[in-house]
Amino acid sequence: MGRGGSILEGAASRRGSSAGFPGLKPLTPVKSEIPEPEVNLQALCPTLNAEEKNEIAMRGCLAMKEEIESSISENERMLDELRAAFDEASLRIGELRRDRADFQRDVLADARAKGVKRGNADKILK
């Protein structure tokens, strides 16, 4: 090593550039290496007359209208499903309240009347 440094030191000083490592390309391309596309818009898009522009706009409007209508129908379907689930949950809550009231009336009321702090296990199992 004629310069007084090791191979590892030389590699560490050049880390981040590919100058010392032939065959390796940098991870991010340099801005000058990315070619800028040259596009002639006049050649790609010939001028349109008012009738053709109107036709394109009408097609766009119809496509957007169809998309809006489909999303409305999909949202209404989901809303109906959510309403059905809400109604089902409300019915279940009513059933649970009735069951709790029946339990309190049948088991706990008897236990309180008899002065027992715990309910009758046989009635609870029923």
Image (cartoon, grey):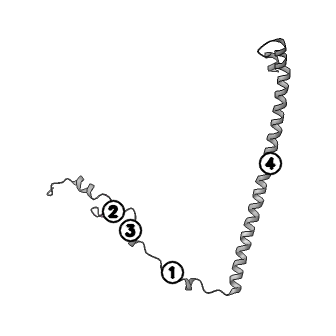
* Rendered view: 90 above or below 22: above
- Tell me which label, 2 or 4, sits earlier in the chain: 2
Q: Gap in Å between the C-alphas at discs 3 and 2? A: 14 Å
Res. 39 mark: 1
Q: Gap in Å between the C-alphas at discs 4 and 1? A: 54 Å
* Residue depicted at 71% across the width and 86% down the height: 51
Identify the secondary structure beneath mark 1. loop
Instruction: Specify few, some or many for label 3: CA neighbours under 10 Å numbering under 14, 14-19, or 20 or more.
Output: few
Q: Nearer the viewer, residue 44 or 78?
A: 78
Is residue 24 shown in magenta?
Answer: yes
* Residue depicted at 83% across the width and 29% down the height: 99
Instruction: Specify few, some or many for label 1: CA neighbours under 10 Å numbering under 14, 14-19, or 20 or more.
Output: few
- Which secondary structure is most common in the magenta stretch? loop
Q: Between label 1 and label 2, give the one nearer the viewer.
A: 1
* Residue depicted at 83% across the width and 35% down the height: 94
Q: According to the image, label 4 marks what residue?
A: 83
Q: Position of residue 4 (x, y in %)?
A: 15, 54
